[in-house]
Structures are given as C-alpha cells and as structure tokens.
Image (tube, rainbow, N blue to C red):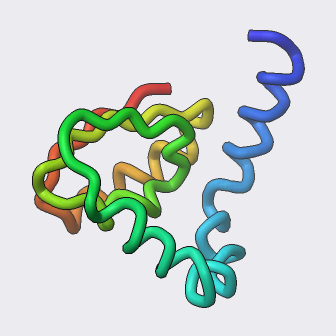
Amino acid sequence: MNNITEKTKKRYNRFSYIYDLVEIPMENSLFKKWRTDLINPLKGNILEIGVGTGKNLSYYNKEAKVIGIDLSPGMLSKAEERLCYMHFCFVFCS
C-alpha cells in the first residue's frame, strides 16, 4: 500500500466509531430515500466497493447476494455489527 492509501485507511479506522452518528442529519433528510429507491430493486450478485459501516445493507432485498469490500477494518467491523440484526449473508473483505 502506498503512503496516501495507508493514511486514508488510518483516518477511516479512527473515525469509524462515530461515522454513522455524524451523518445522521444527511441520512434522515436525503440518503435514506435514495437508498430505498436505488438499492432495494437490485438483485443477483453485487460487489459493493467501499461498504463502509454497512448503511446500505438493510436496503438490499432477499434476492441480492452482496460482497462488501472496504479499505478500513474499523468500518468493516461496524458493518459486521449490523449483520446481527439481518437475515442476509454477506462477505466482507479489506
């Protein structure tokens, strides 16, 4: 990994524990509607690049098979926590 990539990874790892909290205003006013409209109809094999904390995961329908990748293990950890409440099978890679 180059120096810029490593810095980015460290930054997202540090920020991962509050990332969703910081985005609540935008999530409630805008992103939630977009996620419903754009993600729910998707089916089949899906590669989500930059899955982050997994905010999109609950919007996929049961016909979607999702592989999520992210540079940050901290963000992936948050995404995995979301899976405890879902009935889907996801694979995460960093």
At 66% from the left edge and 67% from the top edge, which residue is drawn? 18
In the displayed structure, 58 sits above or below 22; it is: above
Q: Position of residue 16 (x, y in %)?
A: 63, 55
Residue 89 lies in quadrant: top left
Between 82 and 50, which is closer to the camera in this rendering? 50
Q: Position of residue 64 (x, y in %)?
A: 19, 47
Quadrant housing the N terminus:
top right
Residue 68 lies in quadrant: top left
Q: Position of residue 91 (x, y in %)?
A: 28, 34
At 42% from the left edge and 63% from the top edge, which residue is drawn? 38
Left or right: 41 in relation to 5: left
Left or right: 65 in relation to 68: left
Q: Position of residue 47 (x, y in %)?
A: 38, 33
In the displayed structure, 16 sits above or below 34; it is: above
In the displayed structure, 66 sits above or below 27; it is: above
Between 39 and 79, which is closer to the camera in this rendering? 39
Residue 71 lies in quadrant: top right
At 56% from the left edge and 40% from the top edge, which residue is drawn? 50
At 61% from the left edge and 36% from the top edge, which residue is drawn? 72
